[in-house]
């Protein structure tokens, strides 16, 4: 499966390792107070382009985080922004 011009990085493979590296998959199940507390102490910024193929998944992740009481910022940049040129512009703002 591919998304736009991005091919499936795992060629259809899915296991526990992949699950725990995909926040939209595992975060809805997190209910452990110490784990939620640790996540709530993080400074999280999601940055994505308004025309990016991953905008919807970032918005979905943002909803999951808010539903878990995890403060974060969702920053939507002009254009696609899923490229090195856009990342170079973002780095000074978020690091």
Image (cartoon, grey):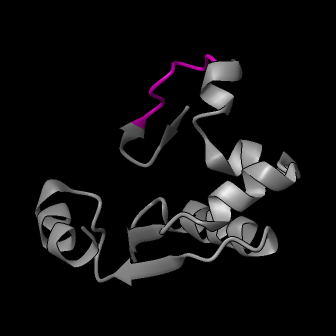
Chief secondary structure of the magenta span? loop
Residue 22, image x and y in percent? 61, 41
- Picture quadrant where residue 63 is located: bottom right
- Picture quadrant where residue 19 is located: top right
Magenta segment includes 8: yes
Residue 85, image x and y in percent? 11, 62
Q: Which residue does the image show at 55% across and 75% down from the upper left?
A: 72
Left/right of residue 16 with respect to residue 7 in the rendered view: right
Q: Quadrant of the N terminus?
A: top right
Which of these two is toward me, 54 or 19? 19
Q: Which residue does the image show at 73% across and 44% down from the upper left?
A: 25
Q: Which residues are magenta?
A: 7-14
Residue 88, image x and y in percent? 12, 64
Residue 43, image x and y in percent? 48, 69
65 lies above or below 19: below
Q: Which residue does the image show at 66% across and 56% down from the upper left?
A: 38
């Amino acid at each position: 499966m591919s998304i736009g011009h991005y091919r499936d990085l795992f060629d259809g493979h899915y296991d526990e390792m992949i699950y725990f590296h995909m926040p939209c998959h595992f975060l809805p199940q997190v209910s452990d107070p110490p784990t939620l507390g640790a996540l709530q102490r993080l400074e999280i910024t999601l940055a994505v382009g308004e025309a990016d193929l991953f905008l919807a998944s970032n918005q979905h992740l943002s909803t999951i985080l808010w539903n878990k009481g995890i403060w974060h910022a969702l920053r939507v940049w002009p254009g696609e922004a899923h490229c090195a040129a856009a990342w170079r512009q973002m780095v000074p703002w978020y690091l």
